[in-house]
Image (cartoon, rainbow, N blue to C red):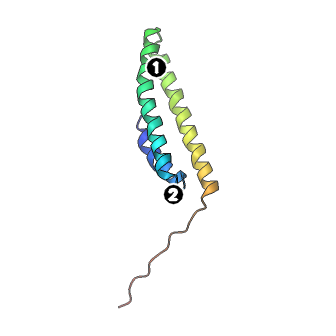
């Protein structure tokens, strides 16, 4: 829940400038697909008679999978884009 908001920032930093709009667009699109498929799948599981505990386990596993994929993307980003030190500005002398 709410992971799509963080995917925008991650996708923007993951893609090169020439592909950034496309990458963010695909990220948002896949989030929208998940927003449609998730509740539909939940309805199917409830109709199949799954217990409440089982539904929460399924939701937790899906969230764990999403978190692990974000962690892998972050690791890949560190390998591709080196850390850039932040420049400090000198205060004007009086």
Q: Residue at x 53, y 35 (%)?
A: 66
- Looking at the picture, how far across and down is residue 32, in whole percent? 42, 33
Q: CA distance from mark 1 to mark 2?
A: 36 Å
* SS label for mark 2: loop
The relative height of residue 69 versus residue 85 in the rendered view (above or below) is above
Name the outermost residue toward the right. 79
Q: Which residue is mark 1?
A: 41
- Looking at the picture, how far across and down is residue 51, in whole percent? 46, 12
The relative height of residue 89 versus residue 16 in the rendered view (above or below) is below
Q: Quadrant of the C terminus?
A: bottom left
- Residue 86: give its label: none
Disc 1 or 2, which lies upstream in sequence? 2
Name the outermost residue toward the bottom. 94
How busy is the neighbourhood of tag 1: few (under 14 within 10 Å), some, or many (20 plus)?
A: few
The relative height of residue 86 versus residue 80 in the rendered view (above or below) is below
Q: Residue at x 61, y 55 (%)?
A: 78
Q: Nearer the viewer, mark 1 or mark 2?
A: 2
Q: Which residue is mark 2?
A: 17
Q: Quadrant of the N terminus?
A: top left
Observer-nearest of 35 and 65:
35
- Looking at the picture, how far across and down is residue 91, in whole percent? 40, 82
Observer-nearest of 31 and 92:
31
Name the outermost residue toward the left. 94
């Amino acid at each position: 829940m709410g992971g799509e908001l963080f995917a925008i920032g991650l996708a923007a930093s993951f893609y090169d400038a020439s592909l950034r709009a496309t990458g963010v667009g695909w990220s948002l699109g896949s989030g929208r697909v998940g927003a449609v498929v998730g509740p539909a799948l939940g309805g199917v599981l409830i109709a199949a008679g799954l217990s409440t505990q089982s539904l929460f386990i399924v939701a937790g596993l899906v969230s764990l999978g999403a978190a692990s994929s974000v962690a892998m993307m972050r690791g890949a980003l560190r390998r591709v884009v080196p850390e850039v030190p932040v420049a400090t500005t000198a205060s004007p002398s009086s």
